[in-house]
Image (tube, rainbow, N blue to C red):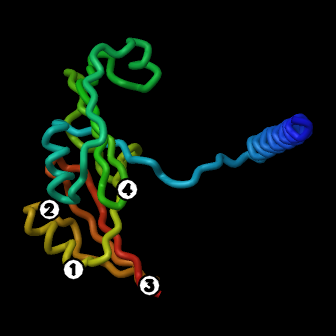
Amino acid sequence: MKLVKPVLVALSIAFTAWAQAATSSTAATASSGVLEVSVIDHVGMNVPDVDAAIHFFSELTDAKVISDIRPGAIPEEWKTQFRWHQSSKLERFAMVQLKGGAKVELFQYRGPDINPEHPHEDDIGASHFALRTNDMARSLAFIKSQGLKVLNEPITNPDGVQWFYFLTPWGSQMELVSMTEK
């Protein structure tokens, strides 16, 4: 019993010192003007039909659904806060996870003011995301075999990185990238 009290005091002092160091480290990082991030957790994508998009990603990449939510009524103030059309309804959103761990969050909205046309890729707000492949030739052949529109044949950058774009069935651009072996 005589040893327990000094050990508890020592642990308490060590924990307090650790907590203070962690707090000052966090404060220093916060004041440094740099946001601490490690990886992209997921990419969000608006789709006309969540079921069709889930099927697309499952067939294309063997993605698995990890969440599927039908939220019901969304607070009206969110429409202003998140820049939605006032007439829009968020019907459903689902998260799929690809084999390598990347995730894609699929949103399905309905409303008379929603523009079903994609912006031009040079318009503000237009976007794409890229998936990495280890076999560019096989991936290109697979994309073509699925009847997806390929926008360009693979291009090889001076650093050896290869890439090409294709369209999802609903018209969003995606890219496949292959890194060089060094």
Q: Amino acid at mark 4?
A: Gly
Q: Residue furthest front?
A: 1
Vertical position of residue 98 compared to residue 143: above or below: above
Q: Secondary structure at mark 1?
A: helix
> Residue 144 placed where, x, y %?
12, 68
Q: Nearer the viewer, mark 4 or mark 3?
A: 4
Q: Residue at left 80%, top 45%?
A: 25
Q: Residue at left 21%, top 25%?
A: 110
Query: Can residue 11 be spotted in the picture?
Result: yes
> Residue 4 placed where, x, y %?
85, 37
- The first of marks 3 and 2 along the sequence is 2
Vertical position of residue 74 compared to residue 172: above or below: above
Q: Secondary structure at mark 4?
A: loop
How far separated are the C-alphas under marks 4 and 3? 29 Å
Q: Secondary structure at mark 2?
A: loop
Give the labeled residue for mark 3. Answer: 158
Q: Residue at left 24%, top 49%?
A: 64
Q: Is residue 113 left or right of residue 144?
A: right
Give the labeled residue for mark 1. Answer: 137
Q: Nearer the viewer, residue 156 or 29?
A: 29
Q: Nearer the viewer, mark 2 or mark 4?
A: 4
Q: Nearer the viewer, mark 3 or mark 1?
A: 1
Q: Secondary structure at mark 3?
A: loop
- The first of marks 4 and 3 along the sequence is 4
Give the labeled residue for mark 2. Answer: 149
